[in-house]
Amino acid sequence: MSPLNIEKGSSSHSAYDLRSHMSDAIETHTLAVLVQNEAGVLARVIGLFSGRGYNIESLTVAEVDHAGHRSRITIVTSGTPQVINQIKMQLERMVPVHEVHDLTVEGAMVSRELALFKVKGKGDHRVEALRIAEIFRANVVDSTLESFVFEITGTPEKIDAFADLMRPLGLLEVARTGVAAIARGA
Amino acid sequence: MTRQMTGAKMVVEALIEQGVDTVFGYPGGAVLPIYDEIFQQNHIRHILVRHEQGAVHAAEGYARATGKPGVVLVTSGPGATNAVTGLVDALMDSIPIVVLTGQVPTFMIGSDAFQEADTVGITRPCTKMNWLVKDTDHLSSTIHEAFHIATKGRPGPVLIDIPKDVQFATGTYVDKPRAKTDHYAPRVKGDTAMITALVEAMEQAERPIFYTGGGVINSGPAASKLLRELVEATGFPITSTLMGLGAYPASGAKWLGMLGMHGLYEANLAMHGCDLMINIGARFDDRITGRINAFSPNSRKAHVDIDPSSINKVIHADFPIIGDVAHVLEDMLRIWKSRGSKTNSAAVKKWWGQIEEWRGVKCLSYKNSEKTIKPQYALERLEALTKGMDRYITTEVGQHQMWAAQYLGFDDPNRWMTSGGLGTMGYGTPASIGVQVAHPDALVINVAGEASWLMNMQEMGTAVQYRLPVKQFILNNERLGMVRQWQELLHGERYSHSWSEALPDFVKLAEAFGCKGILCNNPDDLDEAIKEMLAYDGPVIFDCLVEKHENCFPMIPSGKAHNEMLLGEAETQGVIDAKGSVLV
C-alpha cells in the first residue's frame, strides 16, 4: 500500500508561507486609529506591532477629544496586502480601539509632519540656509548669531528633502513629530 | 441606593453578583484583604491550589467543563508571573477566565517594592484585556466589565491588578446593570447574503466537508445541537480539530475523526480532496493545514468565525462569515430549509464511496503486543471500560494527547479539555481538578505522559485536600515521547535529553500524597487495574508502563501536505527535509 506519493525533498516552501494566494508587493498605508485614552493603550498598540512582527514607519499619538477620552494614533506601516489587512483586523479587535481607518484606501487624504531643524553656520552657509528655508516656507523660530532653528511643515518627503539640503550647511539636530493625517472632504 | 464598602469587599460582592461559585487561588501579602473577605462569607468556594499556574489551568478546566468563566485569585509579583503560562494557554485556546492579582500599594508602584512586578505590562500580550485599578470607586465596575469582555465575542483571559491600598480603601459599589459594557459588543449575526451564497454552494457541492473547531464548543450547547442538525440535513462528512472534539458525536454516522498533523487518514485526505470546505469555528492552525500552498488545493472555502482577524489570516476564504457559530448555524439551517435545499446526492454518494475506501486503510491499526502494554491498547481499554459513564477527559501534551484524541470517543461537547494552541505540558492535572470541582460526581480522567505529569504534580495535594477523585492515567514510557519521535525522524536518532533516568516511584508518590497508586505493566492485568482505578472513591495515580519506543501515527511531517501522511514506521526514513526541519 503506497497511495501517499511522497517525493523525497519535495517541500520547496515553508509551511509558514502564508501569502501565496495574494500579492507579495509591499505597500505603505497610513492608518488612523481612534482609541480610548487610558493608561497603557499606546503600549497595547505598539505591542501588537512588535509581537506580530509588523512594521512601524511613523507613529503619532495625542488626545483629540478630552470630554470623550479619545486619542488618535496615526500609524504609517508597510507590508503585503495580506499583512496590511491583518494589521487592521488585529487593531480592530482590541478592546480599547474604537475605530480603524485606512486613509490610504479610503479616498484622498492630507498628510503632514512637523519638524524642527537646528543649523549652525557663518557667512555664506548661514545666508544659503536662510534662503533655502524661505523656498521651503520654513519659519525661523529661534536664532543666535551662529545658528537657526527652523520649523517646517509638510509631507515626510518634503522634510527629507529639506534635511538633505541643510546637511552640508551645518545641520546639527532634527526633531520630527511623525505623520498626522486626515481624509480630505467631509 | 449607593453602597459604600472596601475594595476587598467589592471584589467578593462583584464575584457573587456575577454568579461565581468557585475561585481558584493562592494567598499572599498583596491580596490579604480579599482573602479576609473570602473568609467571612459562604457564597464562594475557594480552592487552594499548590502553584499559581495550577490555579489558572484549574480555572480553564472549570470553564471548559461548564461554559462559565473560571476565576483565579493570586498575589502580586511571583503570584502573577506564575500565572502567565495559564493566561497564554487560555488566550490561545479562547477560554474565558478572570484573573485577579494583588499589587503593591499605589504609592509604592515603581519603587521595586517587595513582590512588585509590572503585572499589567507583563500580561498585556497574554490577555484579551487587562486593567490596573488605581481607584476603589472604579473597582467593581471594572470587574463587571472584565466578565463581559472575557465571555463576549471570542472568549479569552482577562486580568485585573488590584493594589493593596485600593483593597483597603472605601468606595462606591457599582452593580452589574450599571457597569459600562456596551463599548464592547462583537457582532454575532452573520451576513445573510453570504450565508445564502454558502447554502447555494452546499447544494451544488460534489465533495463537501465540514471542518469544525473549538468555536463550536465556545458558542455553547446550542451550537453543537445545530451542527448535528445541519450535518443530518446535508449528509456531509464532518471532521474536527483537537479543540472541537465532541461538538459532533464520535459515534455519529458522518464522523471522520480528527484531522491534522496526527489526524485520521480519511479526514486529512477528505480535506485535501474536497471541493467545498465549510470551516465552522476553527482557525486554520498550522497543525491543521500542513504546507499552506498545498492545502486543499481544489476547494472553495467557507470560514465562519466570530473573530474577523481569523478570516484570511492564513487561508483565503471564498465565503467569509463573521459571527457566532450558533447564530450562523441557525440562519444556515433556516435558509437551507426555506429554500427546500437538496444536495447533489449522486456526487455526495460517490464522495462517501471514496471516503470509505480511505477508511479501509484503517490508519489507527497498530501492532499489539502480548508482553508490553501498547499505549494505544491502554487507551482502547480505557475507552471500552468507561463507555457510557459520565466522563470528562483532560490531557497533558505530547504523544499520549494525540493518542487520546484518536482512541477516545467524545459524544458531547465540554467533555474534553486539552491544551491545543499553546501545548502546555502540566495542563492536565490542574485542569482535571477544575473539572472535578465543577462536576463532583463525574468521572474525571487526566490522560498523561509521565514527563508532562511531573510538571504540575504538586496539585495532587489540592485533589486530596478537597476530596476530588481525579484519576491520573499516566502512560509512562520513561521518555519525552513526542520529542523522542521527532529526534528519531529528524535528528538521526540522537536522543538528546529526551528521557529521564530518575523517575519517581509513582505508587509511593501516590501514597505520599495520601491517594491511591496503581502500577500496571502487563497487558493481561490492564482491565482489572483500570477497573480498580474506576472503583476507587478518591484520587488515583495510575502508572501504566507502556512500550517505550512507540511512535504516534498517522503523521503529517512538517512542511508536507495532507496527502503526504505517514502511516507507520516503514515510511519514516528521510521524510523530513531541511526546509521542513526548521518548523515545529
Image: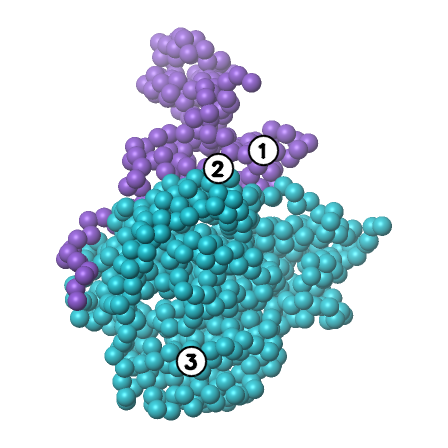
Relative depth, front residue between B264 and B499: B264
Q: Which residue is mark 3?
A: B384
> Residue B129 in the image: x percent, y percent?
56, 50
Q: Between residue B247 and residue B334, name the one nearer to us.
A: B334
Mark 3 falls within which chain?
Answer: B
Question: Which residue extends farthest left?
Answer: A8
Which quarter of the figure has residue B578? bottom left
Residue that mark 1 sits on: A71
* Residue beneath the point at 33% across and 73% down: B480
Look at the image and give the colour of chain A: purple
Amino acid type at circle 2 is Ala
Can I make out residue B478 in this image?
no
- Residue at 32% x, 49% y: name it: B206
Residue B260, given in percent of the width and then of the height, sits at: 34, 59
Q: Is residue B27 left or right of residue B126?
A: right
CB under 8 Å between discs 1 and 3 = no
Pointer 2 chain: B
Residue toward you, B448 or B160: B448
Q: Would you name the residue on which mark 2 appears? A: B193
Q: CA distance from mark 1 to mark 3?
A: 60 Å
Chain B colour is cyan
SS under mark 1? strand
